[in-house]
Structures are given as C-alpha cells and as structure tokens.
Amino acid sequence: MPKKERIRKYSSYDTDFCETRDQNFNIPENYRWLCEKNADKLLSAVLYAIALFFSFFYLRFFLKIRIKGREKLKLAENEGIFLYANHTQPVGDVFLPAFACFPKRIYTVVSRANLAIPVVGKLLPYLGALPIADSISGMAQMSKAIKKHISDKRSVVIYPEAHVWEYYTGIRPFSNEAFLYPARLGAPVYCMTLTYKKSKRCRRPHAYAHIDGPFFAEGKNAYERSVRLFESVLKCMNERSKESDCEYIVYEKATDHKRD
C-alpha cells in the first residue's frame, strides 16, 4: 500500500492539485504575445538556452525520463507542428517537450495563472509561454501568435488535460476544442504520452515519453477535422498509457458522506 502522502483525493477530473497564489490572474492588455524587439529576442534566446541545458540534467538524472519515438518528429522537420501531451510532471512538463523537439523551439499553451508566479511568471513569455486568453482581443492575439509560430516551423505544445496530476498513469478526459488550431491551420499533430514503470533500485519509477504521429485529418470543416484529430490522439494516448505498470501516487475519487 502507498504511504498516506502518496494518496490524493479528487472530486472530479478538473481538480487542481497545483494551484498558484492567483488562480484568477488577468492578462494585461499590453501583454506581448510575440518577442519582436531585438532585445526581447536576445533575452528569449539566452533564457531558452539555459532552460535546455538545465532540462538535460533534470530529466535524465532526476526524473530518469527516456524518450522513445523522437525520430518520428523528423518527418515534419520542415513544418510547424502541434504536440499534445498528458500532464503528469509539475516541473518536468516545462522542459520535456523542449528537449524532445530539439532543435525545434517550442511554445506552450499554459494557464494564465502561471504568469502570477513570483519571478518565474515574468520570464515565462520569453520562454515561450502562451497563456490562455481571457478576452476577445486576447484570443485574437493568441491565435495570431500560434499561427506565426507554426508558419516559422516551430512546435506548439498543448496539455489538453489542463491540470497537473503528478505521476498519474491514466489519460483524463479532454475535448476536441484543443484541436481546433491544427484543424484550421492544417499542421501535423503529434502526441507524447508519459508512462511509468517500476524501478528495481529506486522507489520513484522510471518514466518513458512515447512520441506518436504525425496525425492528419480530413473533413468538411475545421470542427469535423478537430473531432477526428481528437479521436485519433485520445485513442493513441490511451493505448500508450497501458504500458505503465505501477502507481507511485494513487488517485482516489472522494466520496460524499450524506446523512439520511
């Protein structure tokens, strides 16, 4: 049986175990969705290089993550891509896509609450964070930024499950709405599924990141294409998740005790 601290209760799949101090943070009207000034580009390049350097040691020696199927990304090396992944590592998920997609640079769709994190929040735009917009004008700017990154042959990373459930071994429900961008832009879609296997030496399991794709979809309109992409990716991630053989953290559905 797992220790008490490794059992987590949830009321629904929307339960957030990693809340920031300001979950209702509003994106400033003057937020820069693209680093277009030379000074911003330089700072962005330096910070991203530092993050990549750190990611190698953190992923390889602390989390012990192995990436499988990276060669599939070469099929779209001259195109911008969308990469969908399950969300199971609070820190690792920040660095893993960058390491997996190298030399392509990544831009990640994140909760706007991340911008409220002290110090780090100020640096996230330079590291490629794309906070989910909270206004019509913001949505337009976000769409423009995503389209620009895809046209520049970069990677846009999306965690459709939204919230981090550390070491969770299943795939939580998500909708086809997360696939409207590739459906509209016609870009290749990949998925990356993190699975966990017992370690003979350590209590913490080994992690394996499986990359699958590319996925394409035909349809009369963007909505129809998004549904087909969603179905293909969900099926693939569910199949991959079956390769996990242990539960380092156990998630249990909370029960409501009601009096008669």
Image (tube, rainbow, N blue to C red):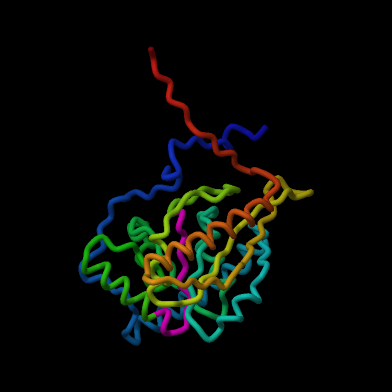
Q: Which residues are magenta?
A: 149-161
Q: Residue at x 43, y 25 (%)?
A: 256
Judging depth in this view, the residue of 235 and 26 nearest the camera is: 235
Residue in the foreground of this view, choosing between 42 and 208 = 208
Look at the image and tell me in which quarter the N terminus lies.
top right
Percent x, y of residue 51? 52, 71
Q: Name which residue lies at 50% across and 35% down.
A: 9
Q: Residue at x 44, y 62 (%)?
A: 227
Q: Nearer the viewer, residue 205 or 158?
A: 158
Tell me: 72 left or right of 82: right
Whether the magenta-drawn stretch holds residue 160 is answered as yes
> Along the horizontal axis of the image, is 38 left or right of 52?
left
Query: Picture quarter containing residue 27?
Result: bottom left
Q: Residue at x 50, y 75 (%)?
A: 188
Question: Up-down: is 169 above or below 103?
Answer: above
Q: Quadrant of the C terminus?
A: top left
Which percent across, then down, holds residue 254?
48, 31
**In the image, farthest residue toward the right:** 200
User: Height in image: 12 above or below 60?
Assistant: above
Q: Quadrant of residue 135?
A: bottom left
In the displayed structure image, the side of residue 240 where residue 107 appears, left or right: left
- Counting the numbered discs, the total is 0
